[in-house]
Amino acid sequence: MPTKAYILIETAVGKTKDVSSALIALNDVVNVDAVTGPYDIIAIVSSNDLTAVGELVTTDIHTIQGIVRTVTCLQLVPST
């Protein structure tokens, strides 16, 4: 079963659109929404396993210019 995660992303001022565009271009990123509140973007990722999600976050997402901070929330129980 794939591993699904929600990535809560805080961006630098004025960088939300650029970060969103970079995120949606990544493999395993299935949805990107700009939101209100303490975070600017919520991205949904789905990958083969936890290791792949970790690599995506640390290697691909964390290197995007304009990202200030991320919080990764793993799905515990799939929706029915």
Image: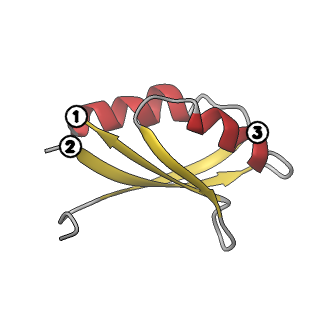
Secondary element type, mark 1: loop
In terms of depth relative to the viewer, which is nearer, 59 or 26? 26
Tally the numbered discs. Answer: 3
Q: Is residue 43 above or below residue 67?
A: below
On the image, the x and y values in percent for residue 62 come to 55, 34
Kindly identify which residue carries mark 1. Answer: 48
Q: Residue at x 20, y 37 (%)?
A: 49
Residue 2: numbered disc:
2
On the image, the x and y values in percent for residue 32 come to 57, 51
Q: Quadrant of the N terminus?
A: top left
Answer with mark 3 or mark 2, whichever residue precedes in sequence. 2
Judge from the rendering whether residue 69 lies leftward or rightward of residue 21; answer left or right. Answer: left
On the image, the x and y values in percent for residue 60 come to 51, 27
Q: Residue at x 66, y 66 (%)?
A: 35
Q: Are marks 1 and 3 in contact (CB under 8 Å)?
A: no
Q: Residue at x 58, y 30 (%)?
A: 25
Kindly identify which residue carries mark 3. Answer: 18
Query: Which residue type carries mark 3?
Result: Asp
Answer with mark 1 or mark 3, whichever residue precedes in sequence. 3
In terms of depth relative to the viewer, which is nearer, 48 or 37? 48
Answer with mark 2 or mark 1, whichever residue precedes in sequence. 2
Query: Which residue type carries mark 2?
Result: Pro
Q: Quadrant of residue 58?
A: top left
How far apart marks 1 and 3 lie (CA) works out to: 27 Å
Query: Which residue type carries mark 1?
Result: Asn
Q: Are marks 2 and 1 in contact (CB under 8 Å)?
A: yes
Secondary element type, mark 3: helix
Q: Are marks 3 and 2 in contact (CB under 8 Å)?
A: no
